[in-house]
Amino acid sequence: MQEEDSDEPRRKLRYRTVFISDTHLGTAGCNADLLLDFLKSIETETLYLVGDIIDGWRLKKGWYWPTRHNDVVRRVLKMAKKGTRIIYVPGNHDEVLRDFVGLNFGDVEIVAEAIHHSADGRKYLVLHGDEFDGVVLYARWLAFLGDHAYALLLRLNIWFNAARRAFGLPYWSLSAHLKAKVKNAVEYICRYEEAVAHAARERGADGVICGHIHSAEIRDFNGILYMNDGDWVESCTALVEHADGRMKILDWAARNRAKRLPSPSGEVEDDAKRQRPGVGPSISTPIPA
């Protein structure tokens, strides 16, 4: 892959708004190459960074910051310089930035949460979502214990994909697959989604956009639209808003595996056909990688 500064000519995917979270820059698990490729492939009026962009927890334990992670940061700043509005909502792994809420850094706005007004007139609450995680909120030492176990799983994921690359196979998330198979994890995700959707209803919003649990999803909870943009450690997904307000999950890892041109709508064609029950026809959800 070429260096970040050499912007090779490419067909851009144009969106009104893009939401990404949980990139975990500063860790070996971050899929910086795919993330950089995604950022170089899009044009958007607004880019929301919905928390855990930089993993301060891991950096405190040991410094890890390869050149490609610098390239990602430089790309975001370059987008801001070219006119994209960048809104950064810190999460629990980059919580140090919560001390700077209300300030701008290099044209990047730092906010605790945001209200996004979509093109079709809906109002969405935008937050990272860790405030709904009882483990993080009420037992911080348990959260760090969980972080250590999760880090081990992600390292296994790196070794697993290194072996796949050696055999010429594309990226596949072992950690995402294993997490989806654990009954308690699935139960937790369901309860998390319900709690976040309930908070959006209490705030008078039409829906909520969050991250935190590394599980991309668009789901309707009795008229409240729950949207999670996923992550760039396991699934490599983003939430995108089209010019008419349609919201979709873009699975960049699946797109990379498929190695085919985008459909006119900008998504991998198969993704546009996948929907969850109760979700309108303008919203699609990819099958987890």
Image: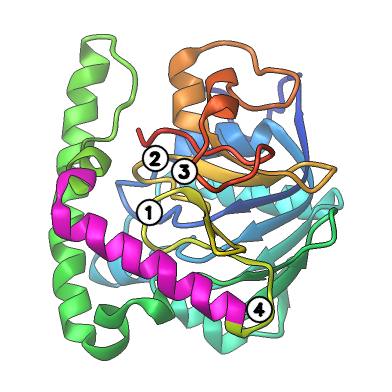
Circle 1 residue: 214
Q: Earlier in the sequence, mark 2 or mark 4?
A: 4
Nearest the camera: 20 or 216?
216
Q: How far apart are marks 4 and 3 (CA)?
A: 27 Å
| Residue 116 in view here | yes
- Looking at the rendering, the stretch of residues picked out in magenta corresponds to 180-201
- Tell me, yes or no, whether the two marked residues, 3 and 2, touch with CB atoms within 8 Å: no
Question: Dot 4 corresponds to which residue?
Answer: 111
Q: Which residue is drawn at 59% across and 84% down?
A: 202
- Mark 1 in CB contact with mark 2 (< 8 angstroms): yes
- Give me the C-alpha separation between circle 4 and circle 1: 21 Å
Marks 1/2: CA–CA distance: 8 Å
At horizontal 22% and vertical 26% (from top left) the residue drawn is 162
- Circle 3: is it few (<14), some (14-19), or many (20+) Cα within 10 Å? few
What residue is rendered at 42% in x and 69% in y? 194
Badge 2: residue crowd in 10 Å (few <14, some 14–19, many ≥20): many
User: Residue 287's spot in the image, x, y percent?
Assistant: 41, 33
Which numbered disc, 3 or 2, marks the residue that appears first in the sequence? 3
Helix, strand or loop at mark 1: loop
State the residue in front, 154 or 134.
134
Give the Cα separation between the discs numbered 2 and 4. Answer: 26 Å
Choose the circle earlier in sequence order: 4 or 1: 4
Residue type at mark 2? Ser
- Left or right, 249 with respect to 78, comes to left
Disc 1 residue type (three-letter) = His
Q: Which amino acid does label 3 sit on?
A: Thr
Residue linked to disc 3: 67
Position of residue 115 relative to residue 14, above or below, is: below
Q: Which of marks 3 and 1 is in front?
A: 1
Location of residue 67 with respect to 220 vertically, above or below: above
